[in-house]
Image: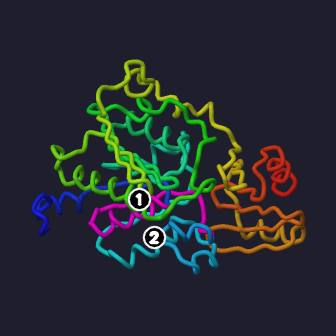
């Protein structure tokens, strides 16, 4: 409140606002930290993954105890952040964001913050936000490079106006790494634009896409300009990412040697522990997920919502074979 551009009135607006952070990895942990400490009234965090040791280099809310406990990222973040600010609502949702559930996840939100690590999910966020009329802060970080922008339906172009392909074969943190300060810079740019929007300082919104390379001392700004005339999202209103008929039940998570299989329904983890223990090398269970080490070295990670990670391969055929062998069709 001492910062005059926000003041008491702006702080009240923050306190009555709701944001959704999709992806609680490197960007998401910094974004959530800023939103909670700024006093945003409702901070909803959505992530499909759990904490692993390799995350700790750049995912600031997690520690080695989270790794040992096998907590989902959203749950681990919730546990930390509720100790930071007990005056606001913090919601942790362990789920894969898809065309089937994204509009329910974003319902009632004033702003969506991009903490994802792939363009397939970003286009899903982009299309849902522009259909629902919700501003969307885009951010990306890899190696020593970063970029960010705030995209506002009806006022700015959408993400598809800049990037036409969602091909996931590009560079990611899991394939070429990232230095943690770049993550902080990108998420802080996103957070500042979020605070401007939520506090009502719309005249201060940055109308550009920022890109930088912190290691090589490069910085660029590109004005957002006019939307692409034939953009299937913000101009033609087709929203291709929301087409549920295009959803695949098995996807490879880039650079992870992990395949996610959606499954056919909820899983009772206690029941599945009993089923799997005689057939696998080791089973560990907590309140949020079950991990099974298979005889040939791969691992299965089962979630209550029905999803299964097959870890140790990025071959969809091999993953589906293991799923069918241990979980069924």
Q: Residue at point 41% right, 64% down?
A: 30
Taking the image as shown, residue 124 lies to the left or right of residue 8, namely right
Do tag 2 and tag 1 residues touch (Cβ < 8 Å)? no
| Mark 2 neighbour class, 10 Å CA radius: few under 14, some 14 to 19, many 20 or more | many
Q: Residue at point 69% right, 42% down?
A: 249
Q: Residue at point 61% right, 56% down?
A: 174
Can the viewer see residue 134?
A: no
Residue 323 belongs to the span the image colors magenta:
no
Return the x and y of residue 286 as percentages of the image width and height. Answer: 66, 74
> To which residue does mark 2 refer?
78
Residue 35 belongs to the span the image colors magenta:
yes
Q: Residue at point 66% right, 67% down?
A: 289
Label 2 SS:
helix
Which residue range is magenta in the image? 26-52
Return the x and y of residue 23 as percentages of the image width and height. Answer: 50, 55
Count the numbered circles shown.
2
Query: Is 131 located above or below residue 319 in the figure?
Result: above
Label 1 SS:
strand
Q: Earlier in the sequence, mark 2 or mark 1?
A: 1
Name the image quarter holding residue 191: bottom left
Name the image quarter holding residue 268: bottom right
Return the x and y of residue 125 as percentages of the image width and height. Answer: 46, 42
227 vs 237, nearest the viewer: 227
Farthest residue, direction front: 216
> To which residue does mark 1 refer?
44
Farthest residue, direction top: 230
192 vs 82, nearest the viewer: 192
């Amino acid at each position: 409140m001492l910062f005059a551009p926000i003041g008491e009135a702006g702080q009240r607006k923050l306190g009555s606002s709701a944001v959704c952070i999709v992806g609680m990895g490197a960007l998401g942990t910094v974004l959530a930290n800023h939103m909670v400490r700024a006093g945003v009234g409702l901070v909803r965090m959505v992530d499909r993954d759990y904490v692993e040791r390799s995350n700790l280099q750049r995912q600031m809310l997690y520690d080695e105890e989270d790794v040992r406990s096998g907590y989902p990222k959203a749950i681990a973040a919730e546990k930390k952040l509720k100790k930071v600010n007990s005056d606001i609502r913090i919601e942790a949702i362990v789920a894969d964001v898809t065309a089937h559930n994204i509009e329910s996840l974003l319902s009632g939100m004033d702003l969506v913050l991009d903490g994802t690590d792939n363009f397939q999910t970003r286009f899903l966020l982009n299309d849902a936000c522009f259909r629902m009329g919700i501003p969307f802060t885009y951010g990306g970080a890899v190696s020593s490079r970063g970029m960010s922008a705030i995209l506002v339906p009806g006022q700015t172009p959408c993400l598809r106006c800049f990037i036409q392909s969602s091909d996931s074969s590009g560079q990611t943190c899991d394939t070429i790494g990232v230095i943690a300060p770049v993550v902080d810079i990108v998420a802080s740019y996103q957070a500042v634009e979020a605070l401007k929007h939520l506090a009502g300082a719309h005249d201060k919104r940055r109308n550009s896409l920022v890109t930088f390379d912190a290691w090589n001392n490069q910085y660029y700004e590109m004005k957002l300009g006019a939307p692409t005339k034939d953009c299937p999202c913000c101009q033609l209103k087709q929203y291709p990412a929301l087409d549920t008929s295009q959803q695949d039940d098995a996807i490879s998570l880039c650079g992870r040697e992990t395949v996610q299989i959606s499954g056919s329904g909820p899983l009772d983890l206690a029941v599945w522990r009993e089923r799997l223990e005689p057939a696998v090398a080791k089973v560990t269970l907590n309140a949020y997920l079950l991990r099974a080490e298979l005889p040939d070295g791969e691992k299965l990670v089962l979630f209550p919502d029905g999803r299964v990670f097959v870890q140790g391969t990025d071959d969809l055929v091999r993953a589906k074979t293991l799923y069918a062998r241990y979980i069924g069709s």
